[in-house]
Amino acid sequence: SQTIHQWPATLVQPVGSPLSLECTVEGTSNPNLYWYRQAAGRGLQLLFYSVGIGQISSEVPQNLSASRPQDRQFILSSKKLLLSDSGFYLCAWRTPGRYEQYFGPGTRLTVT
Amino acid sequence: DQQVKQNSPSLSVQEGRISILNCDYTNSMFDYFLWYKKYPAEGPTFLISISSIKDKNEDGRFTVFLNKSAKHLSLHIVPSQPGDSAVYFCAANFFGNEKLTFGTGTRLTIIP
């Protein structure tokens, strides 16, 4: 069966510090991968998605970037965090050709 | 432009009664619809989906109804249980599109 991992689970970072969140998927090949953010009391905002290694599509221009160095690894990064980057970050995967996305457990990021 | 709308931010239902969550969409290209359930500090969990060629799909206590002419779908939970208390997101997609479009969510509270 497929599983998706995200780490860390929680993170507290000062403004201006760098960020690296990692997501890995097991039990599937060539998944589509997604990064979402949920701000406090808000819905799900799609940040980036990837249909293959090295292929990144950005949905919202902002302080973040994403990379996919391996088939089942998706990384969310920032060089300098802003207070507005605080939120709950979710990684998701999908089998190409199917509609359902499956989410990881999330990372709670607090920028202080 | 919010293409998928959940107009009720919250809903309270007595335990054992029926919970009905509603979702409206505007994009006629959507041909597949999904419901997700989300607990605080966790990733959303896929619940149930429906293709536009159907008007009803049932899975245990959960039934999704689709009214294409009204561009409306609903999720029925019968009977409602305390563990159903969560935020419910509807989502939509169309063939060939890599992304899900999510609604803003409805917080369901089941009253014991």
Image: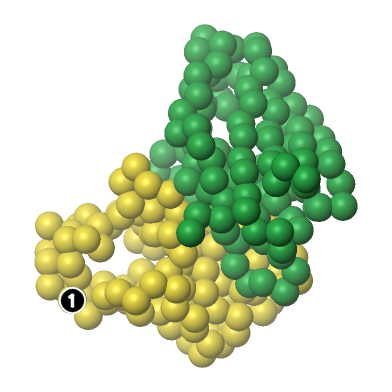
- Residue at 67% x, 79% y: name it: A30
Q: Considering the numbered disc 1 on the image, is that residue within a helix, a strand or a loop? A: loop
Q: Drawn colour of chain B?
A: green
Mark 1 crowd level (few <14, some 14–19, many ≥20, 10 Å Cα): some
Task: Report x, y in % for residue B41.
Answer: 40, 44
Q: Residue at x 62, y 35 (%)?
A: B22
* Above or below for A91 versus A61: above
Could you tell me if residue A105 is visible in this image?
A: no
Question: In x, y percent, where is residue B60?
Answer: 78, 30
Q: Residue at x 44, y 78 (%)?
A: A58
Q: Residue furthest bottom?
A: A54
Q: Is residue B49 left or right of residue A103?
A: right
Q: Nearer the viewer, residue A12 or B97?
A: B97
Residue B7 higher or lower than A112, as above or below: above
Above or below for B17 versus A38: above
Quadrant of residue A18 within the rendered picture: bottom left
Under mark 1, the amino acid is: Lys
Q: Chain of mark 1?
A: A
Colour seen for chain A? yellow
- Classify B90 as above or below B112: below
Q: Which residue occupies the foreground of this view, B91 or A74?
A: B91
Residue matched to label 1: A80
The answer to whether any part of residue B40 appears in the image is yes
